[in-house]
Image: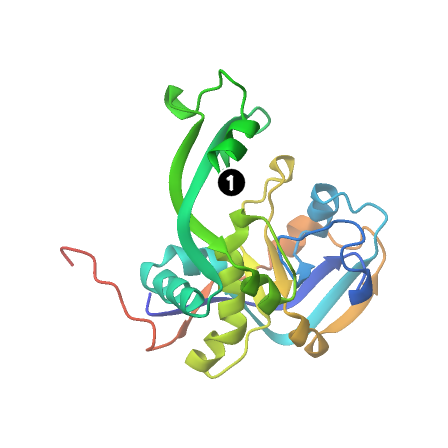
């Protein structure tokens, strides 16, 4: 990949209010930060985020461009570009963290919490708990942590450190990518697995500054079939950018 992966969408859906003043009235934080949360599967997100009784809107624009965050962070060169930019801007720092492991009975998978101190990690696990493969339940690691500046820059305050790089990519797409491509982005997109029973489904977010370019249409509840809407989701395309170097793998 020698460019920027984008998802082009003309129609997305939002469950909730379009009034910025009501943001956070149901949940104190959002995985989409300051963006308006959107998807192509509103029924799934109504259940996942417990939004029953909320309004449903379609948002339309002739050409909406969203950064495909998973694709971007999976590309070594682009990930490096985003991370180095975020570090230079003082948005993230790389430092010691502690992992506290736990087994999720619902998903039958190991998960971990990243915390600042060993004491915080110990408080998250039982005294005789173990981690994956019988290893320790807590362990020292290194990782990226958001600074207060990232929350201030995005206008969303503090958030879970698990989303640090997602939010760094969000800031990059809004503030830096336009200088590399000559066009602005409408928001970010996350191609999560469609598995509502595991609290997972594709989702996106529209930047507040881009919202005026979208037309909102109020819809009756149940007006959208998730399967039909998801079938319209296009493949990710690559927006050329010579500023993103191509990484050559050994032997190629």
Quadrant where the C terminus is found in the figure: bottom left
Residue 208: percent from left, percent from top: 68, 71
x 58%, y 69%: residue? 153
Q: Inspect this view and state whether residue 94 appears.
A: yes
Residue 25: percent from left, percent from top: 81, 53
- In the displayed structure, would residue 103 be above or below residue 163? above
Residue farthest to the bottom, as pictured:
182
Q: Secondary structure at mark 1?
A: strand
User: Seen in the image, is 138 located left or right of residue 24?
Assistant: left
Q: Quadrant of residue 198?
A: top right
Quadrant where the N terminus is found in the figure: bottom left
x 63%, y 62%: residue? 205
Q: Inspect this view and state whether residue 191 appears.
A: no
User: Seen in the image, is 245 located left or right of residue 63?
Assistant: left
Q: What's the image's color scheme?
A: rainbow
Viewer-proximal residue, 159 or 37?
Answer: 159
Residue farthest to the top, as pictured:
128
Residue 30: percent from left, percent from top: 66, 53
Residue 82: percent from left, percent from top: 41, 65
x 13%, y 55%: residue? 251
Q: Quadrant of residue 14?
A: bottom right
Viewer-proximal residue, 221 or 24?
Answer: 24
Viewer-proximal residue, 204 or 29?
Answer: 29
Q: How packed is label 1: few (under 14 Cα within 10 Å), some, or many (20 or more)?
A: some
x 32%, y 78%: residue? 242
- From the image, tell me which residue sits under label 1: 115
Q: Quadrant of residue 209?
A: bottom right
């Amino acid at each position: 990949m020698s460019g920027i992966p984008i998802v082009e969408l003309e129609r997305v859906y939002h469950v909730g209010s379009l009034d910025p003043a009501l943001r956070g009235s149901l949940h104190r934080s959002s995985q989409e930060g300051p963006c308006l949360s959107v998807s192509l599967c509103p029924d799934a997100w109504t259940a996942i985020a417990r939004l029953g009784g909320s309004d449903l809107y379609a948002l339309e624009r002739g050409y909406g461009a969203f950064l495909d965050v998973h694709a971007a962070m999976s590309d070594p060169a682009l990930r490096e570009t985003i991370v180095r930019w975020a570090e230079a801007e003082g948005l993230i720092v790389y430092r010691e963290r502690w992992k506290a492991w736990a087994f999720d009975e619902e998903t039958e998978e190991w998960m971990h919490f990243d915390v600042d101190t060993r004491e915080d990690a110990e408080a998250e696990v039982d005294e005789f708990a173990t981690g994956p493969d019988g290893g320790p339940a807590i362990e020292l690691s290194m990782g990226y942590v958001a600074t207060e500046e990232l929350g201030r820059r995005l206008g969303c305050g503090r958030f879970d450190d698990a989303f640090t790089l997602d939010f760094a990519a969000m800031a990059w797409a809004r503030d830096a990518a336009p200088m590399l491509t000559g066009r602005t982005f409408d928001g970010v997109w996350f191609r999560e697995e469609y598995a509502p029973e595991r609290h997972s489904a594709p989702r996106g977010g529209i930047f507040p500054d881009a919202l005026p370019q979208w037309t909102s249409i109020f819809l009756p509840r149940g007006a959208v079939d998730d399967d039909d809407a998801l079938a319209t989701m296009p493949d990710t395309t690559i927006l050329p950018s010579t500023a993103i170097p191509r990484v050559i793998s050994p032997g190629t």
